[in-house]
Image (cartoon, rainbow, N blue to C red):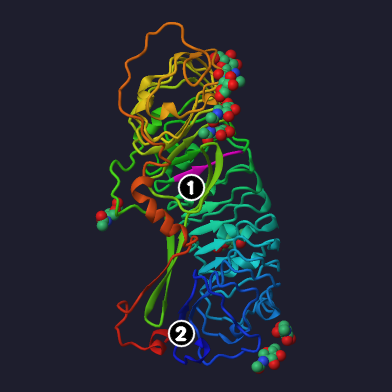
């Protein structure tokens, strides 16, 4: 039906519950598509009619079951330097995420802005030809089986690149220099590979960097406090590496005014907790129900006088409430600190500055001493607090019962004493949260307290366990966006160029 609509140039059928049927005999269509969205349309092959679609600028075949080798007519010419024979010479956005592609990586034409092939079974090394894509804006090769070292030409790679996501492959070797002066890089995710050695100092050139994830590699370096000059940095994840030394110095990362997710867990950092720096964390005090946003980047192209946006939400994996959780989108107000499984020592100082909005604090498995600071009770948005496996002493402050969103709490394996507070969330924690403290008594432990000096507790009623403080108001939106599977397409009709302007004119 669509193939007979002569003037149809944009067709977006993505993310419905339809199966897009193409008879293998449909080779030619009467129309030339420019924008074609067939994500999640139960495709098992590259539809044949695509062969003739030489006007395509935007092609989305993500979330299908395309299992073929990428057909010959697509990649035949891809590896030689002249890409004139590529079937879609105008292509700017190509999204093949979440299929079952196994073929060698294809190199799309030099006009490409967005190239997304995440979540396939692609193998092999990344060809230096990738650096010929001089306008490339987003490159996502994550969750494939790519291996080898990264081509050195990446160091000079296009200053247009904003998104580099290589997470979950088998790359090894040193991380090459990644940003040249004037770089527009916003997201670098090299996590879950086997990169080794030092963090490249050229990261300092990534002045616009917002998210840096180098977690789960074999990096060996001191704490990169020099990253503190990156004033746009919001998320820093260095989890599971061999990083060592003291965290913090006058120009530390914590000077980054926007930083709100910091994961340094499972390294060999020592010294005092860098708490004083968190004072400067300013996060949203009051959340506007109609106006919370995800961290994302977008690219736009002009097609027939319409601006078509391709949104790319940032993603990350962190451990929350004891489980590794994939955040396929990150809400801007989410704030988390994970310093667990290091060798931090000294006291946990009062959490001054009250970085309101902090939802996750994990200090477990360090060598911390002293009392649990009362001011933790002011972190009213906290959902997960893990202080287990340290040498903390004293009582559990009743102020912690003010944390009405706390869904996960763990102080096991410390040297705490006295009565376990009760009320609110504290009536919901299992006894394994308190295990391994010989001096603790009262519910939920079977050990009863001997003296009855019950601390006066605020007598607010028991609230339901809330999953998340913002879920209450925002649940429906999260569900709604959840179905979009990481890709939102907006078509703004008309107004960028004069309404009556014809397609041929725009192209000219
Ligand atoms: C479509 O193309 C294939 C391969 O080139 C060819 O075998 C087939 O006959 C074509 N079908 C039509 C209807 O032209
Ligand atoms: C592949 O490319 C070669 C030369 O570039 C050409 O001779 C051949 O016909 C192409 N094969 C297909 C299937 O397009
Ligand atoms: C990077 O670019 C400079 C000049 O722009 C060139 O001299 C150098 O060889 C390039 N390096 C790589 C690895 O391509
Ligand atoms: C939403 O928030 C942004 C930044 O926080 C602000 O600039 C914008 O005006 C807000 N929009 C509305 C409709 O409140
Ligand atoms: C805290 O981090 C440790 C690993 O360092 C992890 O095992 C534990 O599950 C985390 N706690 C929570 C509540 O997520
Ligand atoms: C933990 O701290 C104590 C002193 O408070 C010190 O003797 C011990 O060596 C530390 N352990 C580690 C693993 O750093
Ligand atoms: C608390 O942490 C310990 C490890 O220190 C773990 O064994 C236990 O399962 C945790 N309990 C809860 C409720 O998370
Ligand atoms: C934890 O609770 C179980 C039953 O719910 C009990 O058998 C066990 O002894 C308790 N453990 C401690 C340390 O109190």
Q: Residue at x 55, y 51 (%)?
A: 189
Q: Which mark is residue 9?
A: 2
Residue 446 makes an appearance in the image: yes
Residue where numbered disc 1 is placed? 204
- In the picture as drawn, the residue positioned furthest to the top comes out as 451
Q: Nearer the viewer, mark 1 or mark 2?
A: 2
Disc 1/disc 2 C-alpha distance (Å): 43 Å
Residue 413 makes an appearance in the image: no
From the top left corner, tell me how far across and down residue 110 is, in percent.
56, 74
Chain part drawn in magenta: 235-240
From the top left corner, tell me how far across and down residue 230 is, in percent.
43, 46
* The magenta stretch spans residue 465: no
Secondary structure beneath disc 1? helix
Q: Residue at x 41, y 30 (%)?
A: 425
* Left or right of 466, for residue 81: right
Image quadrant of ligand 3?
bottom right
From this view, report whether residue 319 is shown above or below residue 349: below
From this view, report whether residue 409 is shown above or below residue 82: above
């Amino acid at each position: 039906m669509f193939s007979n609509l002569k003037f149809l140039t944009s067709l977006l059928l993505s993310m419905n519950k339809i199966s897009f049927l193409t008879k293998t005999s449909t080779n030619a269509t009467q129309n030339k598509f420019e924008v074609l969205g067939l994500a999640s349309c139960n495709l098992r092959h590259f539809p044949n009619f695509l062969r003739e679609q030489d006007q395509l600028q935007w092609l989305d075949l993500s979330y299908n079951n395309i299992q073929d080798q990428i057909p010959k007519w697509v990649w035949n010419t891809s590896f030689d330097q002249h890409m004139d024979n590529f079937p879609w010479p105008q292509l700017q956005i190509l999204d093949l995420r979440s299929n079952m592609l196994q073929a060698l990586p294809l190199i799309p034409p030099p006009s490409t802005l967005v190239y997304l092939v995440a979540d396939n079974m692609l193998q092999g090394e990344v060809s230096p030809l990738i650096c010929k894509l001089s306008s490339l804006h987003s490159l996502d090769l994550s969750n494939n089986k790519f291996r080898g070292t990264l081509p050195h030409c990446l160091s000079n790679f296009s200053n247009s690149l904003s998104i580099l996501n290589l997470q979950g492959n088998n790359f090894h070797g040193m991380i090459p220099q990644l940003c040249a002066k004037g770089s527009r890089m916003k997201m670098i995710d090299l996590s879950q590979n086997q990169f080794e050695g030092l963090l490249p100092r050229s990261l300092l050139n990534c002045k616009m960097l917002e998210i840096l994830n180098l977690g789960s590699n074999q990096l060996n370096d001191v704490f990169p406090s020099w990253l503190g000059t990156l004033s746009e940095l919001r998320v820093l994840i260095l989890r599971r590496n061999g990083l060592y030394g003291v965290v913090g110095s006058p120009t530390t990362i914590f000077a980054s005014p926007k930083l709100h997710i910091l994961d340094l867990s499972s390294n060999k950092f020592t010294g005092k907790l860098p708490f004083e720096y968190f004072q400067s964390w300013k996060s949203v005090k009051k959340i506007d129900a109609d106006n919370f946003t995800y961290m994302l980047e977008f690219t736009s192209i002009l097609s027939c006088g319409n601006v078509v946006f391709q949104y790319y939400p940032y993603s990350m994996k962190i451990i929350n409430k004891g489980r590794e959780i994939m955040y396929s989108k990150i809400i801007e107000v989410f704030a988390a600190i994970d310093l667990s499984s290091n060798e931090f020592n000294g006291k946990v100082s009062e959490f001054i500055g009250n970085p309101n909005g902090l939802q996750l604090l994990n200090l477990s498995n360090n060598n911390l001493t002293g009392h649990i600071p009362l001011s933790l009770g002011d972190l009213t948005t906290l959902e997960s607090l893990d202080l287990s496996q340290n040498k903390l002493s004293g009582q559990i402050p009743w102020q912690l019962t003010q944390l009405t969103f706390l869904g996960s709490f763990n102080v096991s394996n410390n040297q705490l004493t006295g009565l376990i507070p009760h009320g609110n969330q504290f009536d919901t924690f299992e006894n394994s949260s308190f295990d391994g403290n010989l001096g603790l008594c009262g519910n939920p432990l079977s050990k009863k307290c001997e003296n009855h000096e019950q601390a006066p507790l605020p007598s607010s009623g028991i609230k339901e366990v809330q999953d998340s403080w913002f879920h209450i108001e925002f649940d429906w939106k999260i569900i709604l966006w959840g179905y979009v599977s990481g890709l939102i397409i907006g078509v703004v009709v008309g107004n960028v160029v004069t309404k009556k302007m014809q397609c041929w004119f725009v192209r000219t």
